[in-house]
Image: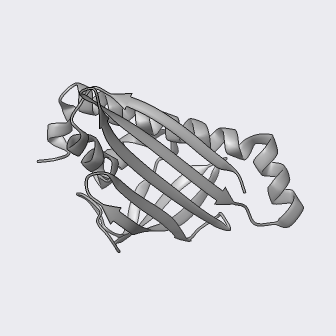
Amino acid sequence: MPVIYIHTEINAPLVICFDLSRSIDLHIASTIKTGEYVIAGRQSGLICLHETVTWKARHFGIWQTLTSKITAFEAPNYFADEMVSGAFKSFRHEHHFQEERGRTIMKDIFEFQTPFGIFGKLAEILFLKKYMERLLTERNKVIKNCAEHNDWKQYLS
């Protein structure tokens, strides 16, 4: 099972970074390239424990639907979301936050499994892990930029 680790340092308060990471509205803004939008579940605002959101997005030229659920929540230090239905066999995305020397350290752990047996494993190796890592890194850059430049106020009013 592939696992992606991403470490992002943000010059902003921990609680702002935590809330931006669970903002549906910022997620939409951060995924403009894939045309992602909500079709069911939590439509806007901050997603919380046991809530679901269903996204529709274009990946690899194909429109896909994915539903995830917040399965763990310890504000403002940790939350996890897991796929309920979608293109993966499974995924779990852990979001960890800690304050260190006046900055927020945001750590993502994303593990996933692909369907389709050997063909899915081949896709993981050839392109899917790198694609997902790039997608998550870009999203974290948006969170970092928003938190550090006071754009967060439009998402956390």
What residue is shown at x 48% (from left), y 45% (from top)?
Answer: 108
Relative to 72, does residue 130 appear above or below in the rendering? above
Relative to 22, does residue 143 appear above or below in the rendering? above
Residue 134 in the image, given as x and y percentages of width and height: 58, 36
- The residue sitting at the left extreme is 157
Residue 46 shown left or right of residue 80 in the figure: left
What residue is shown at x 31% (from left), y 51% (from top)?
Answer: 77
Quadrant of res 152 = top left
What residue is shown at x 76% (from left), y 49% (from top)?
Answer: 124
Residue 123 in the image, given as x and y percentages of width and height: 79, 50
Q: How many marks?
A: 0
Near-viewer residue (71 or 133): 71
What residue is shown at x 23% (from left), y 57% (from top)?
Answer: 45
Residue 113 shown left or right of residue 66 in the figure: right
Residue 64 in the image, given as x and y percentages of width and height: 58, 61
Residue 74 in the image, given as x and y percentages of width and height: 30, 61
Q: Quadrant of the N terminus?
A: bottom right
Residue 77 shown left or right of residue 37 in the figure: left
